[in-house]
Amino acid sequence: MTDEVQILSAGDKYFMEQRDLILQEINESMDAILNQLNGLNITLENSIAVGKEFENVSQIWKLFYNGLESEQVSTESNVEANIGQEPTPGLLPEHTPKDNDNETR
């Protein structure tokens, strides 16, 4: 090895030093990128976990709104179907002449 070092010229030594510095810099940059990707991965896992915690609540609200919507649709269809029909007996109080006579006396 000492023979190889002695054979290298000053330009070659400078090149080797610069190459080693650049490789060291690349290695440090790759380590920093790897650490930042690990941090990003942890953050994404945490946000996914929080999203999953709200999944049940979301399903409950969805059922609630779907129920309201179907109730509104059925009420509207009942109103449309009953337009122009006679009232169903028993739903409205009936006034008979006897009741009116009792009220006036």
Image (cartoon, rainbow, N blue to C red):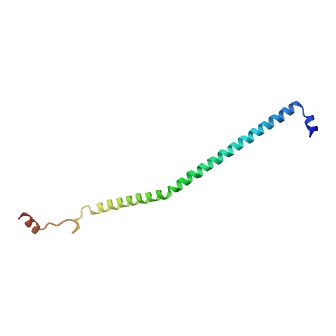
Residue under the point 93% across and 38% down = 2
Q: Position of residue 53 (x, y in %)?
A: 52, 56
65 on left or right of 37: left
Q: Which residue is depicted at the point 67% across and 45% down?
A: 35
Q: Residue 93, located in which quarter of the rendered image?
A: bottom left
Expressed as whole percent of the image width and height from the top left, the position of residue 47 reads 56, 51
Quadrant, the C terminus: bottom left
Q: Quadrant of residue 72?
A: bottom left
Left or right of 93? Residue 50 is right
Number of labelled discs?
0
Q: Quadrant of the N terminus?
A: top right
Residue extending farthest left: 105
Please tell me whether residue 23 is drawn above or below residue 47 in the rendered image. above
On screen, 90 above or below 15? below
Residue plotted at (8% across, 67% down):
102
Pinpoint residue 82: horizontal percent, then vertical percent: 27, 63
Q: Position of residue 61 (x, y in %)?
A: 43, 57
Q: Residue furthest top?
A: 10
Query: Could you tell whether 52 is left or right of 15 in the image?
Result: left
52 or 81: nearer the viewer: 52
As drawn, is 93 to the left or to the right of 77?
left
Q: Quadrant of residue 4?
A: top right
Q: Is residue 30 above or below residue 17?
A: below
